[in-house]
Amino acid sequence: MPTTDELRPENLYDHLERVLIDSDTLRNRIADMGAQITTDFAGRPLTVVTILQGGAVFMADLVREIHLPMKLESISVASYHGGTESSGTVTFHQSRMPDIDDRHVLILDDILDSGRTLDAILNRFRTECQPLSLNTCVLLSKQVERAVPIEADYSGFAIENEFVVGYGLDYDGEYRNLPVIGVLKPAWVREE
C-alpha cells in the first residue's frame, strides 16, 4: 500500500484501474435527472436531504439542475466505516432529524448497495418526522442482491458489483475529489 506522501493530487488518476463513468457522462445524466425531478415536483414544497459525506458532490451538481424553489438539508450516517464493504450497521452521527415536516422530501445518496442506509433513513423519517412524501435519488445503483429490498425512485447509473471511488465516493476518506467514477487498482486497497 502506497504511503500518504505518495498521494499527490496529480497522481490520483494513476490510482485507478479504470474510469467507469467520465465527467461529461456524469454531467449529462445529472442534467437529465434534474429536469425529470423539476417536472415531477413542480408546484410542491420540496426539501432535498443529502446523505453526507458521499452525497455532497452529487447534491451540489444536481440541485443546480432542479429549477424549483427548495430547501436543502443533510444527514450524516455511515455504513462502510473505512472498508470496501458495508459493515451491515447504519450509524447516525446526529440526533436531530432534518426539518422536513409538511414537505415533499427527496433523499440523495451517492450509491445504493445493500439498501440498509436508505432503509434506515426512510424508517427514521417516517417515525420521527411528518413529511408529505418521501422519495429517494441515488447517483449509482449496484446491481446486487440487496440486504433490504429497496430501489431508488431516481437513479443515475446502474453499475456492477465493484468498489468505486470519485465524485464523492471514497475509500477510507480519500478520492472524493476525483471528477469521475473509477475503480481503484488493487495496490491502493489495504487488506481487510
Image (cartoon, helix red, strand yellow):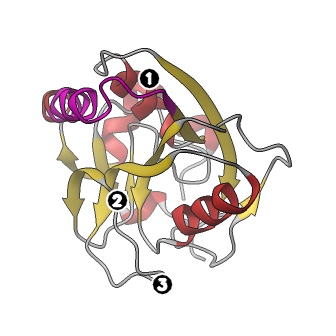
Query: Relative to 142, does residue 17 appear above or below in the rendering?
Result: above
Q: Earlier in the sequence, mark 1 or mark 3?
A: 1
Identified by mark 1, the residue type is Ala
Residue 73 in percent (x, y) is at 62, 30
Marks 1 and 3, Cα distance to the nearest angstrom? 29 Å
Q: Amino acid at mark 3?
A: Ala
Residue beneath disc 3: 147
How crowded is the residue under tag 1: few (<14 C-alpha within 10 Å), some, or many (20+)? few
Instruction: Inspect the image, locate mark 2, and give the three-letter code of the amino acid beneath it.
Output: Ala
Mark found first going from the N terminus, 3 or 2: 3
Task: Magenta stretch: give its range.
Answer: 29-47
Does 28 lie within the magenta span? Answer: no
Where does the image place residue 165, in percent across and percent down from the top left?
Answer: 40, 49
- Disc 1 target residue: 60
Q: Secondary structure at mark 2?
A: loop
At horizontal 18% and vertical 36% (from top left) the residue drawn is 22
Which of the numbered marks, if any, corresponds to residue 85? Answer: none
Q: Is residue 109 visible?
A: yes
Residue named by callout 2: 152
